[in-house]
Image: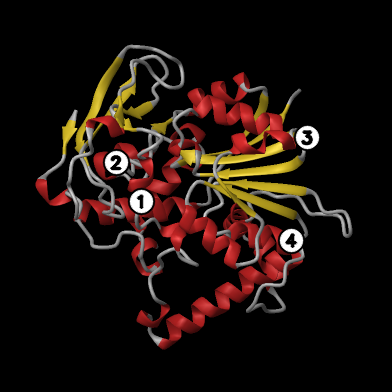
Amino acid sequence: MTSLPPHTSPLSDTPWDANELETLGHCPICQSTTRTVLYEGLTDTLFKCAPGRWTLHACSGCGTAYLNPRPSAASIGKAYASYYTHSEAENKAPAQNLPSWGRALLKCARATFNSYLNARWHTALTPSNAWGRYLVPRISQARALAEQKMRQMPNQPVGRPGRLLDVGCGNGAFLQMAQAAGWSVQGIDFDPLAVAEARRQGLAVDLGGVDQLAAQAQTYDWITCSHVLEHVHEPHQLLQSLHRLLRPCGTLWLQTPNVDSIGHKTYGPYWRGLEPPRHLTLLTLPALRSALEKARFKTHFCRMPLFTVMSVHAASNAMRRGDKNPMALSHAQILRLRFLRLALQQHWRLGRAEFHTVIATRSS
């Protein structure tokens, strides 16, 4: 059990009312009633907008970590007061802080990357150059980063767009990419500010949860669920709902933090993946595989690109230092040898990856 020092307190530390919290008597994944305390006194050190201190437990049965007590479904919205999906783009370190040669190099890299995306998924991203479509496929990590950005989506036949649903679509950034790649897209999110931003982009996005899409059973060819599972109160119920929405042999792409990751082992309560109290449940690989199989999915877990892993380590390290904005890190802060060493340690160990990335096919 680890408690945090005082400097990690968020800007607001007002306690939640008792009627805004709920207490769990068992693990939300395997229902075991046996558990141990991982951390006490966790606070929102990332966005500093959610009040309170939180206790994270580890299930003795399946290893799942879960908050207890936790915000109720009716009160969880106050934990998202300044969440990053409210804006058109995630917080990023400003390019103007780079020297002129650095900005030129970054622009060239972006153009090269976009060139491959345009060739592979028929998008029309700018800036773009002539050689990226040939260069990126020959660099395995660049290709892996592109695949993750597009969430392993297959190409769409011209004139026959498949239907794609992005659950927890936020401000619609990924929906725009999928639409540009030829998909017929729809999104859904609980956050009214994020939904409003997505709608301003002209996207078809509903406010609420997937339960309100029940009438669209067996409608979607591809569903993406990026960093949503850890936010929901009933993970099993979400997975079952996604299974019903997919057409036979349809695909679910899902990504969620891995509580067994090397990053969590290294940074403990400062690990980027904890994010209390928004992250309610954090699974191990066996627990996630079991939950997906219980929902009648066949699973294939994917490796993470090294740069993504390094970004998680850099953000966790910044949180441990107490940096003001761990989400706004420059490439120079991310591309460090110690983060590369940690990333390489987990590259071939799916059970130790920072995030679980799984392609799950509806089996029945």
> Which numbered tag is attached to residue 313?
1
Question: Tag 3 or tag 1, which sits nearer the N-term?
Answer: 3
> Disc 1, disc 2: CB below 8 Å?
yes
Question: How busy is the neighbourhood of tag 2: few (under 14 within 10 Å), some, or many (20 plus)?
Answer: some
Q: Secondary structure at mark 4?
A: loop
Q: CA distance from mark 2 to mark 3?
A: 41 Å
Image quarter hosting the C terminus: top right
Q: Nearer the viewer, mark 2 or mark 4?
A: 4
Residue 296 placement (x, y as % from top left): 67, 22
Q: Residue at x 31, y 41 (%)?
A: 276
Q: CA distance from mark 1 to mark 2?
A: 9 Å
Circle 3: residue type: Arg
Question: Tag 3 or tag 2, which sits nearer the N-term?
Answer: 3
Question: Tag 1 or tag 4, which sits nearer the N-term?
Answer: 4
Residue position marked by numbered label 3 in the rendering: 247
> Disc 2, disc 4: CB below 8 Å?
no
Q: Secondary structure at mark 2?
A: helix
